[in-house]
Image (tube, coloured by chain):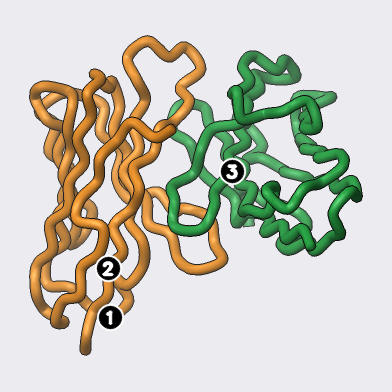
Amino acid sequence: DTGVSQDPRHKITKRGQNVTFRCDPISEHNRLYWYRQTLGQGPEFLTYFQNEAQLEKSRLLSDRFSAERPKGSFSTLEIQRTEQGDSAMYLCASSLNTQYFGPGTRLTVL
Amino acid sequence: GQQLNQSPQSMFIQEGEDVSMNCTSSSIFNTWLWYKQEPGEGPVLLIALYKAGELTSNGRLTAQFGITRKDSFLNISASIPSDVGIYFCAGQPIYNAGNMLTFGGGTRLMVKP
C-alpha cells in the first residue's frame, strides 16, 4: 500500500501525559499537512511542511503542540501535557497538488 | 472556524434515489474537492475541481465548480448502500500559497436498502 500511513491508529492517555504521532506520506509528495477533526465537524488545518520546512501554523496549534519533518519524509506531531480538549482525530495528508489523507490517529485523553 | 456552509447536514434516502449536496462560501476558492469519510477512517478523495464552471464525473458521482468560484455541488445518482458515509466539501482559498484546505461541516448520508 503506497498511501499515507499514520501510527498509532488509536491512543488513549491520561491528562498531563505527552503523546507523539507519526505520519508517513506518499513517497514523492513534497507537502505534508496535519489537521484535527472533532466529532461531528470537518477537519481543521493545524500546520504544514514543504519538504523539511514548516511554513505555516494555525492559531489552533498551541505551544503544547510541536511538529517536525526532519528529513522531508515522515513527520511527527507531539502534544505535551495533554488536556481533555485535545481528544480528537488527528489527520495527516500529503500532496504534490491534491491532498490525500491517511487513516488518522484517534486520541482520547482521560 | 470553518468558512464553508455545507447542506444538507444529513440525508436519509431510499436505495436507488439520486442525492444532491452543496457547499457555499463567502470567499473565492481556486480549488474545490469532495471527500467521503467512513467511521474511524480518514477522508477519501472523490473528485477534484480546478476551474470555474468545471463539471467532472467519477462513476455515479458528478461535481461542479460554480462559476462565481464561491460554490460547488456534488450529485450521486442511483444510490446504493455502500454510499453511506459523511461527505465533505473542501476548498483552497484563492490567496493561499500553502494550499491548506477549509472544510465544510459534512453531509451525513444514510441509505435504506
Q: Nearer the viewer, residue B72 or B60?
A: B72
Task: Give the colour of chain B.
Answer: orange
Name the residue that disc number 1 marks.
B81
- Expressed as whole percent of the image width and height from the top left, the position of residue A76 reads 79, 37
Task: Give the colour of chain A.
Answer: green
The residue type indicated by label 2 comes to: Leu
- Report whether A7 appears left or right of B31: right
Q: Nearer the viewer, residue B19 or A27?
A: B19
Chain of the residue displaying label 2: B
Pointers 3 and 2 within a single chain = no
Residue at 77 percent across and 58 percent down: it is A109
Mark 1 vs 2, N-terminal side: 1
Residue A102 is labelled as none
Q: Nearer the viewer, residue A108 or A26?
A: A108
Name the residue that disc number 3 marks.
A36
User: Could one spot residue A13 in this view of the protein?
Assistant: yes
The residue type indicated by label 3 comes to: Arg
As drawn, A39 above or below A56: below
Residue at 59 percent across and 24 percent down: it is A58
Residues at marks 1 and 2, CA–CA distance in whole angstroms: 10 Å
Quarter of the rendering containing residue A57: top right
User: Could one spot residue A30 in this view of the protein?
Assistant: no
Chain of the residue displaying label 1: B
- Between disc 3 and disc 1, the foreground one is 3
- Expressed as whole percent of the image width and height from the top left, the position of residue A91 reads 60, 46
Name the residue that disc number 2 marks.
B109
Residue at 17 percent across and 33 percent down: it is B71
Residues at marks 3 and 2, CA–CA distance in whole angstroms: 22 Å
The residue type indicated by label 1 comes to: Pro
- Please rate how many residues cluster around mark 2, counting C-alpha atoms within 10 Å: few if below 14, some from 14 to 19, many from 20: many
Residue at 67 percent across and 59 percent down: it is A106
Split into 4 quadrants, where in the image is the N terminus of chain B?
top left
